[in-house]
Amino acid sequence: MKSLTISNLSKTYFDPYAAKHLTAVHDVSLEVPEGEFVSIVGPSGCGKTTILNMIAGFLPASSGEIIVDGRLVSGPGPDRGVVFQSHALFPWKTVLENVAFGPKMRGVGLKEREAIALDYLALAGLSHAAERYPNELSGGMQQRVGVVRALANEPAVLLMDEPFASVDAQTRMTLQEELTRIWQARRPTILFITHDVPEAVFLANRVVVLSKGRVLEQVEIDLPRPRSWDTMMENEIFKQLSARVLQLVRAA
Amino acid sequence: MHSIFIQPVLNFWSGYIRLVTRYPTLGSIFPFIPLLLLWSVVVDAEFFPRSFFPGPADVAKAFYDLSRKGILLAYLEDSVVRLVVGAAAGMFAGVFLGLLVGLNAGFYRALWPILLFFQAIGDIAWLPLLIIWFGFGIKTMTFVIVYTVLFPVVLNTVLGVRSIPLDLHRAAQSLGASRWSILTNVVLPGALPNIMTGLRNGLGYGWRALIAAEMIVGTSGIGFMMFDARRSGSVVEILLGMIILGLLWYAVDALILAPIERATGQRWGMVTQ
Amino acid sequence: MTAVIQDQGFVARAMKLARPALTFIAPLFVMVLFWELLIRIFDVHPGIFPGVSAVLIAGAESITNGSLFLHIGASLARVLTGTILAILVAVPLGVLMGVSPGVSMFLTPLFRFFSVLAGIAWIPIATLWFGYGFGAITFVIFNAVFFVVAYNTLLGVSSIPLQLRHAAASLGAQRWAMLWEVLLPGALPNIVTGVRTGIGFAWRGLIAAEMIATNLGLGYMLFLARDFYRTELIVFGMIVIGILWLMIDRLILAPLERRTIERWGLVR
């Protein structure tokens, strides 16, 4: 069961400048069943990135449990793939080597892992870029490689930290559509962090609104798939849901 | 989660961070404390005989003795004066020569390989010849320091001058600037980061050259003191000399060079040329 | 017909490669002519500065009697040994220190301090501890290279963006893989720059050390010649030192550094 369960997650940390303890996340609980696409939205500083970092294992939790695929989480690992805002591709490796990295860490042989990497690159329409270096690619392509690199490792959960925030608007829309297409093809379990409300509603099955470290409300997104921006712009339900979530976020 | 032991440590660390942020110089000093402690402990454990490997207390005592006798100050003065005089001469000559070679294509083609070659020979290799010409004395040492400081300054200045886009020259000309104005308003500011790097490197090499020259040639100065102490087997004085060298250079680096670094956005440890 | 065209191509290519070498050597050649001219015009006493022919003869002599190669061999052996040892110790240490931001912030001042003490300052204590000869000089070389390389490695590793290390960790990289796949490649430009700087310091320290602490090597060759007022041998030695360093730095180290930064210096 490749699912994610967070129970009573909290994070307090010590600020050396203020010389006191600050709480970033208060007692957050969340369930992401297998194959679901859940989005977390909230204003800056609401703790969403902190939660992601705890699930990813980059940050230890102060209290609470994170259970992925039936196991307790402690520290980073290949069962939780991460897509960063700043692509974080290895600049000294080719695109192919980057995507094959995860399988390489698992001990997969050269031929086999290159085949896996090429397969996933094809999925994202990037086969032609396999031998290029990351700095030769555009921002949008870099982000796609980042997504594909995490997916190629077939993690139980894919964590995405505002991955499209640093890309221009047109490219962002294309990337969003592509992400839903990939998701429909492979159905990974995704937790997607963003501050962009329409993006969250467009992508997810469920949107979780976070405010000041607490879960405000969860909104089910009952929109048909496949989704594309041309149709979505006019969709009444989309507009209503976006407005609703936006209201929640702004009131937070 | 935060047990009794962690809290005081956190407080201490937070205090440290705040202090160091306000006074960065302290952050440069604090790390030496555990080093000194470690040194004392190793010396006390007597892995080596005390005469071979003295401790901080012994060195401090030697410092006090030599200071009191005025020897240390005299040596220090000698070393520093030589360095300052030689370095100043080297810097002025270096910038001047650098501007000349950088701005004139003919000079560049003719002189650049020669400059590189003479830099490759290095200051120390000149010592035997210098000793024949000037004997063991101040002329020899000054030459060595000027020579050492000159080349990094010249080479970096040339680099800086040549990397100013031609368009900037042209823009200044079409705005009616005289050659002198172009020099002072375009060339010098444009080449300044590189010149600073050259000065920093030059000073670094110059300092080392000074000590080497004092050891081989000198009759006074810190380098001489260290070398002489070797003959009498006085390790304490050698260590004292090393520490003084380190401190002096550290002070120069932190109080003069680092601010320059920060002002011109350079990074220590990266060699340009 | 085709043979002639191909020949032209080869000659053209050979000339293309030779041009930078020629532009470099030409001014030096002119300088040598100047040198000989000045000696003759001012009738300089050979004890002050030798003529070109005297230097060439002395040089030929030292080559034929093998002494030149002995000295060059000794000097290079010391540099090589000291440098390799220093790199083997400094890089792992630098990596260990660089991985933790707290540790690197704390240790950086220490390494900057000892970096300054490069080379020559260690000679008195080195000769006292190791006696004269290979050990003391290699120790000096080691120190000259070690601190600079360790510092630069520390710098390089600590400036690898944290997200890259996170990315590798979440792709399953364990300690060893993290080192080889992320830390070393990421720090490589800094490491190579450090090595180049360190060898520069080491070379200077080597010549100085060889003047006072041994009886074999290029520095010693110069100093010995001075004892006998053989200026032509001194000048020959100086030219050899210059050429050697030019070859090492310009033909090996600088291209290495440039190539490394091109390939791996993409993080910044």
Image: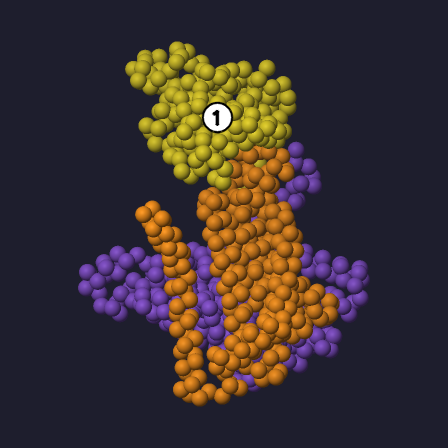
Q: Which residue is drawn at 31% across and 63% down?
A: B187
Q: In this view, does C152 lie above or below B223?
A: above
B197 or A19, which lies in front?
B197
Q: Quadrant of residue C169?
A: top right
The colour one sees for chain C in the rendered image is orange
Q: Which residue lies furthest to the front in this view?
A: C1
Q: Is residue C263 above or below residue B34?
A: above
The answer to whether residue B14 of the structure is visible from this angle is no
Point out residue A106 in the picture as x, y percentages from the top left corner.
Answer: 61, 28
The image shows a total of numbered marks equal to: 1
Query: Where C112 sits versus B139, above or below?
Result: above
The amino acid type, in three-letter code, at marker 1 is Leu
Q: Which chain does yellow denote in the image?
A: A
Q: Residue at x 57, y 65 (%)?
A: C203
Q: What residue lies at 46% left-to-right and 60% top-to-bottom? A: B273
Give the residue at x 52% y 38%: C164
Chain identifier, purple in the render: B
The residue that disc 1 covers is A118
Relative depth, front residue between B155 and B195:
B155
Q: Is residue B176 left or right of residue B198?
A: left
- Residue B226, position in %: x, y? 66, 74
Q: Which of the pair B188/C144 is nearer the observer?
A: C144
- Using the image, name the chain to which the residue with label 1 belongs: A
Residue B51 seen in the current view:
yes
Nearer to the camera, B164 or C131: C131
Helix, strand or loop for disc 1: helix
For residue A96, side relative to residue C16 (left or right): right
User: Label 1: how many residues lie within 10 Å, few (<14), some (14-19) or many (20+)?
Assistant: many
